[in-house]
Amino acid sequence: QVQLVESGGGLVQPGGSLRLSCAVSGFTLDSYTIGWFRQAPGKEREGVACITNTKARTYYSDSVKGRFTISRDHAENTVYLQMNSLTPEDTAIYYCAASINSPKFVLAVIAHTPMSIDSWGQGTQVTVSS
């Protein structure tokens, strides 16, 4: 059974940092492309970053490029999202997601095209406020 469990959200001041974790079970990180979506109040869910299954290539939306870093640890079967230089515009619920369709996942992140996700986490709240 595929399961994604996020952790690491919280309240941070503008300019601060947070690291989100997505613990994966039921499959290995080489099997699925894993990434992060976020949904702010009143807005649609948008792709933020992803790391591809076989070659671990990383992709980012323009809004987070240069500030966020996605990585993975095979030993822990966990994907991380390091978020730096946070702004109030980053406030949202962040969802970990997995898909076997890497090309569509990449497009969802870089061009915000819609796609069907194979598995979602429960979400973790990130609030950036002074």
Image (cartoon, rainbow, N blue to C red):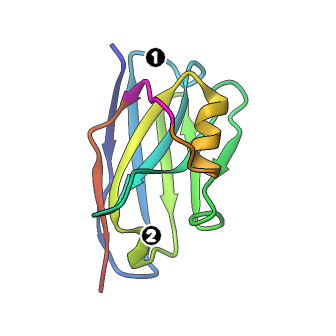
What residue is disc 1 on? 27
Q: Magenta: predominant secondary structure element?
A: loop
The percent coordinates of residue 54 (x first, y second) are 69, 24
Is 57 in the magenta?
no
The percent coordinates of residue 91 (x first, y second) are 35, 68
Q: Could you say which is closer to the camera, residue 79 or residue 42?
A: 42
What residue is disc 2 on? 17
Secondary structure beneath disc 2? Answer: loop
Q: Quadrant of the N terminus?
A: top left
Say above or below: 129 vs 5: below
In this view, the residue farthest toward the bottom is 130
Say which quarter of the image contains residue 12. bottom left
Type of amino acid at the residue the image marks with label 1: Phe
Q: Which region of the structure is painted magenta? A: 115-119
Say above or below: 103 vs 65: above
Say which quarter of the image contains residue 53. top right
Q: Could you say which is closer to the camera, residue 107 or residue 51?
A: 107
Say above or below: 54 vs 65: above
